[in-house]
Image (tube, rainbow, N blue to C red):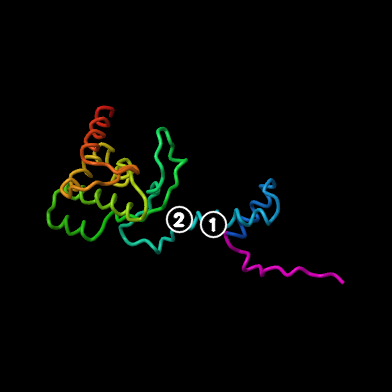
Amino acid sequence: MKQTQRQTPAWERKTLEGILGYFLEQNCLQLGGRLMIEPVVKEVIRLFDEFCPPIDRLKMGQVVWYAVDVNEKSGYGKSIDKCKLNAVVLDLINLGDIDDLLAGLNKRERQKKVAARLFEQAYEQGSVLTSSDVAAIMRLAPARSANTSVKPKRSTGSQFRVGGTFTTWDQLSLIKGLYASNV
């Protein structure tokens, strides 16, 4: 008597996991059988969920950005593809920005507030942004974003994070001077 293997119903296999598993099974023979493929598929799906959050979780004015993990160790010449990245949700525009615009706050002051908010929100989510990240998000030149983000934090007198390390105002002024002379 022939025993039939009970498979999951077809409708349960019509998922991203099923499609990815089939693709790997057919095209990546070096992975072996299903026992080796299933953990790979689960990790790919986990990474996809982490880095591509559903659009319905975002509010108006928010953007997803990939930032370096706050606990990542920095090193000379270490490239970004060797760093742990996190997806962070940042408020590019919020109601306070609209109120500031309607109140007549000048553009530079509004940019300072947005830059400071972006750095703080990324840090609150366990990640750090660089000045180049903030420049790209705000569509500014990198040197401009460094100038924009410095002044609002100076009044608090605290240290802040830039590119994964704690930075003081004196260190940032030095970095800005070096950057400006090389641009």
Asked whether 153 falls inside the magenta stretch, the response is no
Coordinates of residue 46 in the picture (x, y in percent): 52, 57
Among the 4 quarters of the image, the one containing residue 58: bottom left
Whether residue 43 sits left or right of residue 180 in the image: it is: right
The answer to which of marks 2 and 1 sits earlier in the sequence is 1
Whether residue 182 sits left or right of residue 73 in the image: it is: left
Along the viewing direction, whichever of 183 and 103 lies nearer the viewer: 183
- Residue span colored magenta: 1-16
Residue at 55% from the left image edge and 55% from the top image edge: 43
> Pointer 2: what residue?
52
Among the 4 quarters of the image, the one containing residue 132: top left
> Residue reaching furthest top?
181
Question: How far apart, in angstroms, are the residues tagged by discs 2 and 1?
Answer: 10 Å
Among the 4 quarters of the image, the one containing residue 131: top left
From the image, which quarter does the N terminus lie in?
A: bottom right
Residue at 64% from the left image edge and 51% from the top image edge: 24
From the image, which quarter does the C terminus lie in?
A: top left
Q: Residues within 10 Å of mark 1 (few under 14, many from 20)?
A: some
Coordinates of residue 83 in the picture (x, y in percent): 44, 43
Coordinates of residue 179 in the picture (x, y in percent): 27, 32
Asked whether 13 falls inside the magenta stretch, the response is yes
State the predominant SS element of the stretch in magenta.
Answer: loop
Give the amino acid at mark 2: Cys
> Pointer 1: what residue?
45
